[in-house]
Image (tube, grey):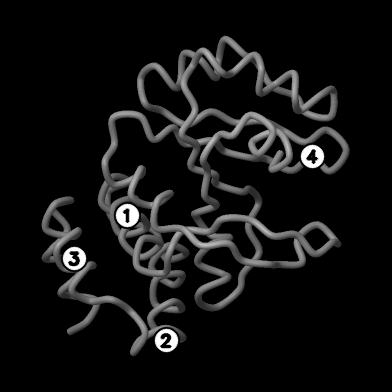
Amino acid sequence: MLAALDKLEIKYAVGGSVASSMHGIARFTGDVDILVDMHPTQVTDFLDALGDGFAADADHIRNAFRISRPANLIHIESVYKFDLFPVSGNRFRLAEIQRSTMRESNLFGESIEFAVVSAEDAILAKLDWIRQSGGGSDKQLNDILGIIAIQDDKLDRAYMSTTAAELGLTAELNRLFD
């Protein structure tokens, strides 16, 4: 997956529970969320670069990206799911990629280096997900609390406050730190 993104020079960052596990308290997750700055016209080239190791439907991915929705691919051998989140038209998601840093991790039995969203962006993205899903996700909240527990004094609270205001998440962020 990462080799295909790199080959096509598609900017990306790993987010979701993989990112929160790297910044906070690790937990098992059934998928990998990847933010991608990929235009729908790049989908065929991307799938060609992936090869036959993934189950994916080009039309599904293109259609999802056109309406700014995530699309998924399944790694056939491991049956692991990758959710691709397009950044087009979403300033926050683009900022997540721009603010990401390269991190090394032992995923899938080998040490690999990949771009990971910042701790601050992982918290904000999970707060936004909780809001969009109606507020009922203990896993997401525990991920956030795990990041805060590990990163507390390192978090850029000014950035988080400004970005939370832009996302309409000020009250939710304030509750976390109260």
The residue singled out by tag 4 in the image is: 79
Q: CA distance from mark 3 to mark 4?
A: 35 Å
Q: Amino acid at mark 3?
A: Glu
Residue drawn where x is 32% and y is 54% of the image: 130
Numbered mark located on residue 172 in the image: 3
- Contact between labelled residues 3 and 1, with CB atoms less than 8 Å apart: yes
Q: Amino acid at mark 1?
A: Ile
In the shown orientation, is residue 134 left or right of residue 151?
A: left
Element under disc 2: helix
Element under disc 1: helix
**Residue 63's spot in the image, x, y percent?**
46, 13
Quarter the N terminus occupies: top right
Residue drawn where x is 12% and y is 63% of the image: 170
- Along the line of sight, the residue nearer the viewer: 15 or 29: 15
The residue singled out by tag 2 in the image is: 149
Labels 1 and 2: the sequence-earlier one: 1
Q: CA distance from mark 1 to mark 3?
A: 10 Å
Task: Answer few, some or many: residues within 10 Å of disc 4's Cα (few below 14, many 20 plus, some between 14 and 19).
Answer: few
- Along the line of sight, the residue nearer the viewer: 157 or 102: 102
**Residue 3's spot in the image, x, y percent?**
73, 40
Element under disc 3: helix
Task: Answer few, some or many: residues within 10 Å of disc 1's Cα (few below 14, many 20 plus, some between 14 and 19).
Answer: some
**Residue 62's spot in the image, x, y percent?**
51, 15
* Quadrant position of residue 178: bottom left
Labels 1 and 3: the sequence-earlier one: 1
* Quadrant position of residue 81: top right
**Residue 122's spot in the image, x, y percent?**
40, 62
Residue sticking out furthest to the bottom:
153
Element under disc 4: loop
Q: CA distance from mark 1 to mark 4?
A: 27 Å
Residue drawn where x is 55% and y is 15% of the image: 60
Numbered mark located on residue 130 in the image: 1
